[in-house]
């Protein structure tokens, strides 16, 4: 049976991260259409995740939530971050529904617990049942409760990593993960796409990866590549591609080559 494909729509892709709460609606709607069209012809199933972009990241940074709760002054930032992340999520799921993709919303703040910033517990039965019924689970970066820190930020990268551990236990294998951002994969120092990154070549690539543009409390491209390498050790291939190119996501889902960076399964 074909395995799952996970799709991450980066926060820098679906929002303008240099301006607070600035969704790129035309990009979101186009990508939703590509997902809906490709999904209708795929043998395998999909899970979509997205970043919080200039919505949740701005609120989380304002209250310093990335390192957990240290003072009572931070508490108002918890519901604010949760609500702002959910606001962007509603835009994404609304676009998917309008495109005919049958999205099923799953809020990490309601089903996931972390330990010192690392997701450790997940009530994943709703996600699995949604998949079994032909729905499209949609998750996102969110503020979550944390056993050690009180509160922490769960990025989509960390959530995908936890799913890579949990879903195979239920017989749901993950074949690949598509990471969509604003560039044709990972660039080298000369601005050229690095076609392939492995554990052996990561050190050279790491020097080319700069700080994320705008507000980002989860690490941007470096966090994405490190996550992809960890998943490669679990037999999962990642492809980092440019979601600003119309049709790139749809072609990749159909198995056609597009410019980007592959992190192959080890």
Image (cartoon, rainbow, N blue to C red):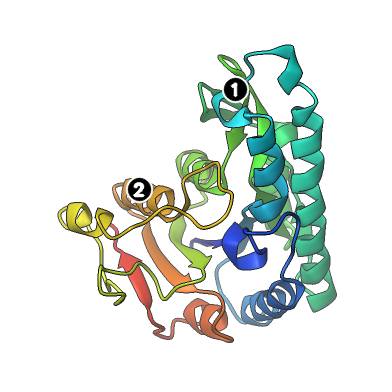
In which quadrant of the rendered view does residue 77 lie? top right
How many numbered markers are drawn?
2
Question: Where in the figure is residue 265, as x and y percent of width and height?
Answer: 29, 58
Tell me what residue is drawn at x 51 percent, y 71 percent: 182
Secondary structure of residue under mark 2: helix
Which residue does the numbered mark 2 point to in the structure image?
226
| Residue depth check, mark 1 versus mark 2: number of the one nearer the observer | 1
Question: Where in the figure is residue 10, as x and y percent of width and height?
Answer: 57, 60
Instruction: Work out whether residue 13 or residue 46 is closer to the camera in this orientation and state it.
Output: 13
Residue 199 seen by the camera: no
What is the spatial separation of the Cα atoms under label 1 and label 2, in whole angstroms?
Answer: 22 Å
| Number of the label disc, if any, that sits on residue 68 | 1
Which of pointers 1 and 2 lies earlier in the amino acid sequence?
Answer: 1
Question: Where in the figure is residue 172, as x and y percent of width and height?
Answer: 52, 51
* Residue lying at the far left of the rendered structure: 200
As drawn, 218 above or below 260: above
Residue 145 relative to residue 193: left or right: right
User: Mark 1, residues whose alpha carbon is within 10 Å: few (<14), some, or many (≥20)?
Assistant: many
Tell me what residue is drawn at x 61 percent, y 58 percent: 11
Instruction: Work out whether residue 129 or residue 244 is closer to the camera in this orientation and state it.
Output: 244
**What is the quadrant of the C terminus in the image?**
bottom left
In which quadrant of the rendered view does residue 79 lie? top right
Tell me what residue is drawn at x 38 percent, y 81 percent: 259
Residue 191 seen by the camera: yes
């Amino acid at each position: 049976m074909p395995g799952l494909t996970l799709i991450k729509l980066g926060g820098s892709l679906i929002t303008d991260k240099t301006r607070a709460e600035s969704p790129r609606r035309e990009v979101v709607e186009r990508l939703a259409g590509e997902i809906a069209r490709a999904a209708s012809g795929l043998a395998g199933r999909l899970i979509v995740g997205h970043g919080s972009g200039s919505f949740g990241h701005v609120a989380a940074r304002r209250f310093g939530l990335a390192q957990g709760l240290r003072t009572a002054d931070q508490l108002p930032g918890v519901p604010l971050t949760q609500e702002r992340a959910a606001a962007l999520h509603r835009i994404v799921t609304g676009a998917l529904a309008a495109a005919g993709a049958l999205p099923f919303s799953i809020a990490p703040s309601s089903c996931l617990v972390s330990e010192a910033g690392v997701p450790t517990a997940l009530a994943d039965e709703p996600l699995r049942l949604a998949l079994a019924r032909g729905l499209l689970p949609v998750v996102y970066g969110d503020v979550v409760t944390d056993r050690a820190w009180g509160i922490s930020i769960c990025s989509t990268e960390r959530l995908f990593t936890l799913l890579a551990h949990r879903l195979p236990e239920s017989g749901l294998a993950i074949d690949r993960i598509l990471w969509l951002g604003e560039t044709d994969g990972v660039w080298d120092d000369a601005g050229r796409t690095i076609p392939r990154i492995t554990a052996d070549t990561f050190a050279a690539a790491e020097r080319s990866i700069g700080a994320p543009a705008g507000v980002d409390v989860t690490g941007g491209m470096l966090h994405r590549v490190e996550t992809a390498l960890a998943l490669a050790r679990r037999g999962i291939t990642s492809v980092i591609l440019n979601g600003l190119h119309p049709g790139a996501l749809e072609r990749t889902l159909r198995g056609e080559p597009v410019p980007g960076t592959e992190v192959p399964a080890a």
